[in-house]
């Protein structure tokens, strides 16, 4: 968090403002490609550090399966253990700044359980366990719109 604040404060030093006569004042900011890449790298590092070891909310779904009955599936204790960002880019346009992360992989761990109840069979069927999941080639696009 501290590097982000330092970057913001340093960038404010390079702001230029101009007014002349009856014109309205404005502030213009010049951002170099090198500055954008630096900010991108800090933002990605901070995002990865804050996401890793975070726990996602429980996922629960109940569906009616024809001829079987109700099936309930629960995924719990979903934890992101590792994220690897393979490539990223930052692009500027007329409407804002786009940050693209591509080729990202993530390792997750979770607990799962399911149960099936049917009016045909008075005894429910259930099972549970743990799983590890690897997400490959994820692509994330963040757009910061400038007004």
Image (tube, rainbow, N blue to C red):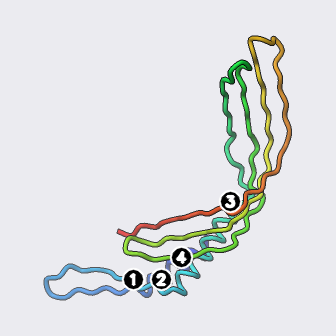
Give the number of the mark in front: 2 or 1. Answer: 1
Q: Are marks 2 and 1 in contact (CB under 8 Å)?
A: yes
Q: Residue at x 42, y 71 (%)?
A: 96
Give the number of the mark in front: 1 or 4. Answer: 4
Density class for disc 3 (Cα within 10 Å; few <14, some 14-19, many ≥20) is some
Regarding mark 2 in the picture, which secondary structure is present there?
Answer: helix
Separation of residues labelled 4 and 2 (CA atoms): 17 Å
| Mark 4 vs 2, N-terminal side | 2
Regarding mark 1 in the picture, which secondary structure is present there?
Answer: loop
| Mark 3 vs 2, N-terminal side | 2
Relative to residue 59, is residue 5 drawn left or right?
left
Relative to residue 107, is residue 58 drawn left or right?
left
Regarding mark 4 in the picture, which secondary structure is present there?
Answer: strand
The residue pinned by badge 1 equals 29
The residue pinned by badge 4 equals 90
| Mark 3 vs 4, N-terminal side | 3
Q: Nearer the viewer, residue 63 or 57?
A: 63
| Mark 2 vs 1, N-terminal side | 2
Density class for disc 4 (Cα within 10 Å; few <14, some 14-19, many ≥20) is some
Q: Quadrant of the C terminus?
A: bottom left
| Mark 1 vs 4, N-terminal side | 1
Q: Is residue 79 above or below residue 72?
A: below
The residue pinned by badge 2 equals 11
Q: Quadrant of residue 95?
A: bottom left
Could you say where residue 87 lies in the image, as x and y percent from the top left? 65, 74
Labelled disc at residue 138: none
Labelled disc at residue 51: 3
Separation of residues labelled 2 and 1 (CA atoms): 9 Å
């Amino acid at each position: 968090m501290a590097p982000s604040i330092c970057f913001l404060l340093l960038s404010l030093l390079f702001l230029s403002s101009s007014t002349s006569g009856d014109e309205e004042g404005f502030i213009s900011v010049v951002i170099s490609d090198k500055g954008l890449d630096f900010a991108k790298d800090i933002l990605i590092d901070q995002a990865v550090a804050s996401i890793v070891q975070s726990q996602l909310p429980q996922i629960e779904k109940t569906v009616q399966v024809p001829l079987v009955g109700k099936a309930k599936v629960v995924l719990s204790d979903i934890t992101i253990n590792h994220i690897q960002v393979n490539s990223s880019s930052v692009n500027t346009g007329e409407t804002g700044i786009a940050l693209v992360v591509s080729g990202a992989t993530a390792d997750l761990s979770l607990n799962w359980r399911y149960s099936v109840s049917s009016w045909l069979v008075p005894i429910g069927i259930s099972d549970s366990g743990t799983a590890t999941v690897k997400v490959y080639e994820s692509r994330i696009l963040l757009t910061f719109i400038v007004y």
